[in-house]
Image: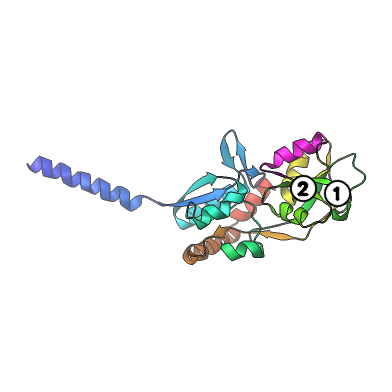
Amino acid sequence: MKKILKSLVLFLMLVVSSLTFAKEKLYVGTNAEFPPFEYLDKGDIVGFDIDLVKAIGNKLGMDVVIKDMSFDGLIPALETNKVDIVIAGMTATDERKIAVNFSNPYYTANQVIILKDDNKDIKTFDDLNGKLVGVMLGFTGDVVVSEMKNVESKKYNASFAAIMELQNNKIDAVVLDSETALNYLKNNKGLKLADTSGEPEEYAIAISKKNTELLNKINTALDELKKDGTYESLLKKYM
């Protein structure tokens, strides 16, 4: 009987110990179609945003669980508690702020026009008049082009699909965030940027309006990562 009780006590101690040291999980929504911020590498989701949110998780003492989904499904997933936060090169627009809260900005970008390098007709956004332009569904470029008169947009779920159709002369141009556009230029010959760019926009982490405590913790973690050099090292790694 004593042996049984001793074994039971040891078992309960192990259970309590595992519960004590188990980390709380932080479920993160992203869209792995946006290099260098988030993309697939041999089946793994990697990128600047991914490393950044994992560093935030370390600061918070939480295990980060990444969930890849379509970009236009990210905010609905946040609103229905399928994820705790969203990091996906997402611009903190006034429209999105109606539905969710945003952290302090962590990156500034702008919209640019990707062209084939033999294109001499398109130099500014005004020159997209009458053209067929590829955009990422739900991204800022989609919004910008959709608001332009006499410009037809073709929407894609993956940016590489738009780039391929540009290379194959199926569309006239692609409007995309600047850093991702530069990444495609680096890895694909025969492409260039138009001479102009859009207004600066700020990327931030989206969080449910019901979770202000988590918002404050993430802002604190972002500040600490900038102060301790982690943020700068990630910029050097990916940008």
Which residue does the numbered mark 1 point to in the structure image?
Answer: 194
Residue 213 locus on image (x, y percent) = 47, 65
Which-is-in-front pick, marks 1 and 2? 2
Residue 214 painted magenta = no
Residue ranking furthest to the right: 120
Q: Secondary structure at mark 1?
A: strand
The residue that appears at 68% across and 52% down in the rendered structure is 139
Which residue does the numbered mark 2 point to in the structure image?
Answer: 153
Amino acid type, callout 2: Ser
For residue 20, the mark is: none
Q: Quadrant of residue 163?
A: top right
The residue that appears at 85% across and 49% down in the rendered structure is 194
Residue 59 locus on image (x, y percent) = 49, 56
Q: Secondary structure at mark 2?
A: strand
Residue 204 locus on image (x, y percent) = 62, 59
Circle 1 Cα neighbour tier, 10 Å, few/some/many (<14 / 14–19 / ≥20): many
The answer to which of 135 and 203 lies nearer the viewer is: 135
